[in-house]
Amino acid sequence: MPEYTNDPVVSKSTNGAVSVRGMSNGTALWGMSLEEVGVVGVGRHHGVYGETRASGAGAAGVTGQGVEAGHGVMGITGAHSRAGVFGVHDSMEGPGVYGRGKPAGMFEGDVKITGDLMIEDANLIALLDASNQRIAALEEKVASLRGQLESTIEMLRHHLQERTLTH
């Protein structure tokens, strides 16, 4: 394979064909920089696209690994109402985003949930609904007891007044 030193290779395609293609039983395309970015992808729809046809643990369309002090994968956007990192599970039979660690997830700022929040096979909404029902029942009981207490106090005042008048 030819080696180029201080002689960058440029390949252009103006008809929509692939400009650079690598095919291998090993790594097809590899980029390394000692000072800057190893590989850059810029595109109208996707800057970098990854796809895997393997199955099993560790198979991924795109993998990022922070070896020394960096993040494994980082997403940043300045676009209004868009996510820095976005995950979707097309079949809806698995998580769109999965995290493992201590903590498995960390958020700085408000968290918006548009569906149910499940905690260890417990539906938080159902737990809150049950708690709200218990609170409402207790509030009714307190109101009833308050009414009984006020009646008892009024009865005692009346009894005390009668007793005072008779003596």
Image (cartoon, grey):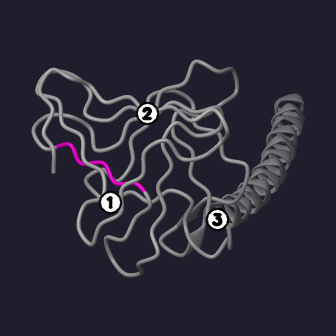
Whole-angstrom CA distance, mark 2 to mark 3, is 61 Å
Q: Nearer the viewer, residue 54 or 159?
A: 54
Q: Disc 3 or 1, which lies upstream in sequence? A: 1
In-image side of 46 versus 135 (left or right): left
SS of the residue under disc 3: helix
Q: Nearer the viewer, residue 3 or 150?
A: 3
In-image side of 4 versus 116 (left or right): left
The part of the chain drawn in magenta is 62-66
> Residue farthest to the bottom?
56
Residue 166: x and y in percent read 88, 34
Which mark is on residue 100? 1
Where is mark 3, residue-wise?
127
In-image side of 149 versus 33 (left or right): right
Which mark is on residue 11? 2
Query: Foreground mark, 1 or 2?
Result: 2
Residue type at mark 1: give it: Arg
Query: Looking at the image, which residue is at 75% across and 50% down?
Result: 142
Q: Nearer the viewer, residue 10 or 133?
A: 10
